[in-house]
Image (cartoon, rainbow, N blue to C red):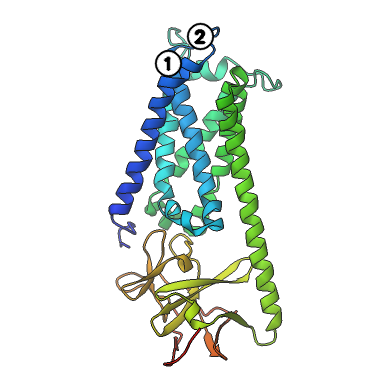
Amino acid sequence: MSVRYIPVQWNRNKWLYDAVLLAAAVVYIAVFLYLAPQLADHTRPVDAAIWRARAFGTCAFLMLTVILAIGPLARLDARFLPLLYNRRHFGVLTFFIALGHALFILDWYFAFSRTPPLEALLGSNTAFGHLVGFPFEVLGIAALLVMAVMAFTSHDFWLSFLGPKLWKKLHLLVYIGYLGAVGHLAFGAWLDQGTAGLSLLLFGGAGAVAALHILSALKERRLAASAAVGMGASAEDHWIQVCPPLEIPDKRGRIVVLSPDERVAVFRNGDTIAAVANACAHQNGPLGEGKIVGGCITCPWHGFGYRMEDGKSPPPFTEMVPTYRLRLSDGMVYVHDQANPPGTYQEPIKLQEGVNA
């Protein structure tokens, strides 16, 4: 965390994450430029500038596809969570690669004409009423603008300035950008030269993103349904069964679904158990997927920390999250479904010697 809007300083994981991203992008572009011309239909020659544009364009599309797949993958399998934590870096690099694609195109369109390249790009085809020959360039520009907004608002200053809810809604524009990218690729390169590789990238990528989101939504729906059953069993006193205390890993948490829109994170630190809201005050990150570091529940996304007993960040930080009441009955931990106001002290459960799972 930082009072200068920088939640986590650069560390080994971040350097490794970015190095792998950059290396993968470079390798993909290099392999594309080497292999694609050799596999192309030589009866329809394409010049080098277009190959470069397509290398950068398909790379950006593939990266955007992976970005949108990471979220549901992490919901379906916790082993994908490390890919989620620095996903903003992924988005920024994707924007710059997409920008490279756009610059190669502008350098090629009407390069020897007196017409300015951007004007030529947008004015040469306005057949919006036709499927074949649709001005796919407009869709590409829309996708690039969305990626630009997301890249330039990725810093924590904008998160603090706009607030987590508005910032999150702004970044949901990525789905609009992805639809634009799908249309740009489909009406452009795919209709022009629909190779097997391009078809796999376009339809396989978009289909995988859609399928993963559906599977993730179904899993969340099942969790919400099971939570509703659990709440029904204790509707009179509002206490929700969690699990035996030692089933919560030491210095880790267990996420409990209270309703379709509410989750609570129940943590154990040795013989002490406490509960806080699952949503981090920084960017609504899942606190229950984090761990206890230095006595504080630490968000896995950007390192914001909160004390177990009151949900407050240690001084000089001021962030806070709601806490929840807990009780231990018949060897089972229960959480009350009504949250305390953010920063409210709540006495943790102290386990007695001999308590077992």
Q: Residue 55's spot in the image, x, y percent? A: 45, 25
The secondary structure type at the circle numbered 1 is helix
Residue 179 visible to the viewer: no
Query: Residue at image x 46%, y 41%?
Result: 149
Where residue 42 sits: x, y (%)? 52, 9
Q: Residue under circle 1?
A: 49
Residue linked to disc 2: 45
Q: Horizontal and vertical percent for residue 52?
A: 42, 21
**Placement of 279 over or under 266, stated as above or below:** above
Residue 63 seen from this side: yes
Q: Is residue 4 above or below residue 94?
A: below
Residue 207 location, quadrant: top right
Q: Which amino acid, mark 1?
A: Ala
- Say left or right for 101 vs 214: left
Image coordinates for residue 102, horizontal then vertical, percent: 45, 25
In this rendered view, identify the residue nearer to me: 143 or 56: 56
* Label 2 secondary element: loop
In the picture, which quadrant includes the N terminus? Answer: bottom left
Query: Few, some or many C-alpha atoms within 10 Å of disc 1 (few <14, some 14-19, many ≥20)?
Result: few
Q: Is residue 298 left or right of residue 9?
A: right
Quick check: 329 left or right of 307? right
Say which of 43 and 9 sits in front. Answer: 43
Residue 194 location, quadrant: top right
Choose between 111 and 77: the one closer to the eye.
Answer: 77
Pair 2/1: label in front: 2
